[in-house]
Image (cartoon, grey):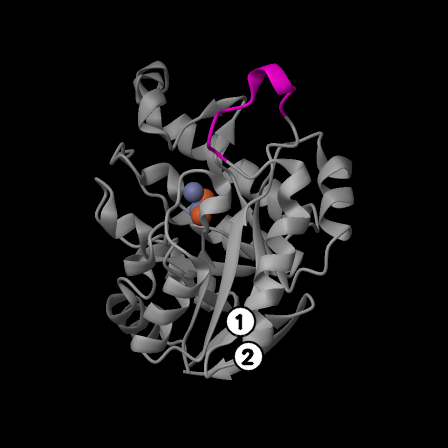
Amino acid sequence: MLADYHIHTKMCGHATGELEEYLAVAQKFGLSEIGFSDHMPLYFLPPERMIPNYAMPEDEIPVYVNEIGRLQEKGGTVRIKLGVEADYIPGCEKKLEKLLNAHPFDYVIGSVHFIDGWSFDRMEEIDRYGEWDIWELYERYFNLVQQAALSGLFDIMAHPDLIKKFNFLPSGDLWPLYEETARVFKRAGVCLEVNTAGLRYPVREIYPSPDLLEAAFRNGLPVTLGSDAHIPEQVNAGFTEAVALIKETGYTEIALFEKRSRVLKKI
Ligand code: ZN
Ligand code: FE
Ligand code: FE
Ligand code: ZN
């Protein structure tokens, strides 16, 4: 029983392929379930500061919802869920809440891709790592991720240590920060996403790191699996490694969602 819950569509402007092609790859690998989780509009940016091809425009959310519905109606062996990936920006919670409540999502993945307006996971903005003490950057990032979890807007926290993407790693013991983050996630009632996209980037490691996953397990946090596919071939990518990692850590179940309520299923 495996499910890929982090799949993008061409509606965000930077993924390619038809929905049916993503589904076909899931079928090929025998996944029981997939969930599309395309990027919510950049609801927190004024129109003149929109990043082109970064997320679907607001007026296209209903189209996205309908397209997934159309695929669900076709039926088939792979169950299909309607998810979404939404950015957390402190101070903009109300606006996001309104957008999320307007549609029948099965789950909402919360992401931190911006620190004070800096889109730190984009290659185009990589120079700005030079302005930071990397340790302070990690503290700032994990603080935001914790705040995001506590906002109550999200079911799943995406790629929880995305800040390591370009391999800017702090020296020093990250365990206390991981432990604190896991405790806050538990209090917030969110799941942690095991996201294999990290394997495709300079860090060459699944998000979260084994230590962060260990902290999550000790604190009783459920996990979901996600490939963060932006092309059909990436569905299920890295899942052999991800499943080995979660099993080694002690997990025997993953979380699934329907209409924003969670069930745990044996893997
Ligand atoms: Zn994307
Ligand atoms: Fe993301
Ligand atoms: Fe994503
Ligand atoms: Zn993502």
> In front: 215, or 112?
112
Region rendered in magenta:
45-54
Question: Residue 67 occupies which quadrant of the picture?
Answer: bottom right
Query: Mark 2 — residue?
Result: 264
The answer to whether residue 256 is left or right of residue 161 is: right
**Residue at (35, 52) in percent of width and height:** 207
**Disc 1 Cβ-to-ligand 3 distance below 8 Å:** no
Question: Residue 259 occupies which quadrant of the picture?
Answer: bottom right
| SS for dot 2 | strand
| SS for dot 1 | strand
Question: Residue 258 occupies which quadrant of the picture?
Answer: bottom right
For residue 190, say whether it is visible.
no
Query: Mark 1 — residue?
Result: 80
Nearest to N terminus: mark 2 or mark 1: 1
Residue 219 x/y as whole percent: 51, 65
Residue 115 x/y as whole percent: 50, 27
The answer to whether residue 181 is left or right of residue 201 is: right
> In front: 114, or 167?
114
Residue 182 x/y as whole percent: 51, 55
Please check the rendered image and state whether residue 9 is part of the magenta-colored stretch, yes or no. Answer: no
Question: Quarter of the image containing the N terminus?
Answer: bottom left
Crowding at dot 1, Cα within 10 Å, few <14 / some 14-19 / many 20+, comes out as many
> In front: 166, or 231?
231
Residue 90 x/y as whole percent: 66, 31
Residue 125 vertical placement versus 16 (above, below): above
The answer to whether residue 247 is left or right of residue 53 is: left
**Residue at (59, 42) in percent of width and height:** 40
**Residue at (56, 17) in percent of width and height:** 49
Crowding at dot 2, Cα within 10 Å, few <14 / some 14-19 / many 20+, comes out as some
For the stretch drawn in magenta, the main secondary structure is: loop
- How far apart in space, not on screen, are marks 2 and 1 (Cα)? 17 Å
Residue 214 vertical placement versus 38 (above, below): below
